[in-house]
Image (cartoon, rainbow, N blue to C red):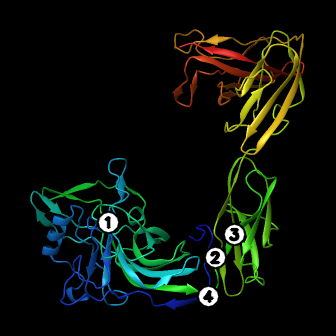
Amino acid sequence: MRLWAQDTCHRVPLTPIFILNNPTLLPGPGCSSTFRGVPYWYPASTEMLTFFLSPCTNYLVNDTSYIAGTKQSPVVGILPIVPQPVPDGKGVIAVGDYGFAPGSIHVNPTYKSFASTCLTQILQKDSLYRFDFYAGFGEQGNQYIQLSNDYLGPQFSTTRETFGLFGMADCSGVDNPVGFYGCVGRIGWIPLGEVTVTGVRGHWTKASMFFTPPIDVAAISIGPSCDTNFSNLPFFSTANGKTYSSNRYAFFLDSLQFYAAVAPPPLVNLVSGDSCAADVVLGFQPAVYYARSSLQWFQGDSLLGGETGDQITIPHGASGADTFRCRVQNDSLCLVSNPIVVDWVPVPGPAALGSPDTTVCQSDTLVLRDAADSNLSFRYQWQDGSTLPFLTVTQPGTYSVSITDACGTTTAQKVVRFAVCDYEVFVPNAFSPNNDGHNDLFRATFFHPPTRFLLQVFSRDGLELYSSRDPGRGWDGNFGRQRQPAGTYIWTVRYTDGKGKERSLTGTVILVR
């Protein structure tokens, strides 16, 4: 569970748990700073190097190690300068983020490096934890290393970076890194949480993330999150006439520490109802534990006024998904629950065809359709056997349609009458948008300008392709920037004539290409 990004509620009683081997990154025997040599910690990929820097080298990596790294992977850069002082004065992890895209030229969302380790104690499923660490943002140095005709060039730290924590159910992949490029989220690890840290070059910034593991976690990996960042810098630069990769960044990690919450994580569950029901009931758990706390429900980012109980009833909304959360607060804690999504299915109703009867003008064509079904999820069965989402009517009578979706079937009907009309409007039955100056637009022409006007054009599937309230404008045969194919389209015109009478016309038009 990631805490609600828009909410500043991050307070909970915690106790430190010491489950990391070598949390201060003390180096093994010898004195070196390289991509090997720190006990219990390993890179997640052999193609994206993770460096371990030692205080005995003043956190500097020698040229030999960099050259050895380039033989293993071509995505290597000279690390930024480690900010001083280092938080715990001992070892430092250096991770790279090459998932940057300058414009649309180069996209490497999975080019990340991570440090992984096996825990001494399992992080338990559905328990609430906090992970603290320091993120170091380094300045760019001035060192270059000759590599054939190219350079190995210096990196620096962007001052805003998102770090991710990942978990694995066992330790099988920790000391056996995968030999290809890839974010750990794509090679057997699952995301636990992430946090965006805004830092300053030459300084360390403390960061925290709350999370609730969806499984029991025996191993963790930390590094840049599995995203793509966008940069205005060129991917390649030159120095002394030599080319080097410049759009690569590295960051430092130190002082890693886990904390366990003494309170259970707040959860929201579905109590009753489903996507088709008239309403659903959501419940906050564990309500008994938080009995003396104040609760507040949210829909999306919006507070739901008056909804402060441990259950909430949500009436059926329009089709689509709504997200709900509950915040719990007392003197010692403030937490936001997991988000729960209610995905409403549109429910067909007996009024799908509008008013139960209508009168249209003689010689006009009326198109019956379910204007509410914008997502085309309904299935139709008209009384004449047609299964299209509309029915063309030229004769008076009673017309009915059965409408079915995942929530069931309903029947709607409409009585259609025809009468003599006195309106003065011309709507063509065909047009040809070929820019020849003749019939390039489909529009209604009035002998007397209407006081109010609306023209709509629909595809045969019921998708609205055009609408305008200006009778001087017309449809050019496009939807957005896409030319629509030749064929028959449905139109409706609603307007108020010079006598103040509201008129409504419906018909079809042929688009000629």
**Of pointers 2 and 3, the one earlier in the residue sequence:** 2
Q: How crowded is mark 1: few (under 14 residues within 10 Å), some or many (20 or more)?
A: many
Q: Mark 1 points at which residue?
A: 249
Q: What residue type is labelled 2?
A: Cys
Q: Residue furthest left?
A: 148
The kind of secondary structure element at disc 4 is loop
Q: Distance between the residues labelled 2 and 3?
A: 17 Å
**Of pointers 3 and 4, the one earlier in the residue sequence:** 4
- Report if the CB atoms under discs 3 and 1 are less than 8 Å apart: no
Q: Name the residue under label 3.
A: 268
Q: Is residue 20 left or right of residue 390?
A: left
Q: How far apart are marks 1 and 4 (CA)?
A: 38 Å
Q: From the image, which quarter does the N terminus lie in?
A: bottom right
- Against 506, residue 313 (above or below) is below
Q: Name the residue under label 2.
A: 9
Task: In the rendered structure, find residue 262 and report the number of the disc placed on it.
Answer: 4
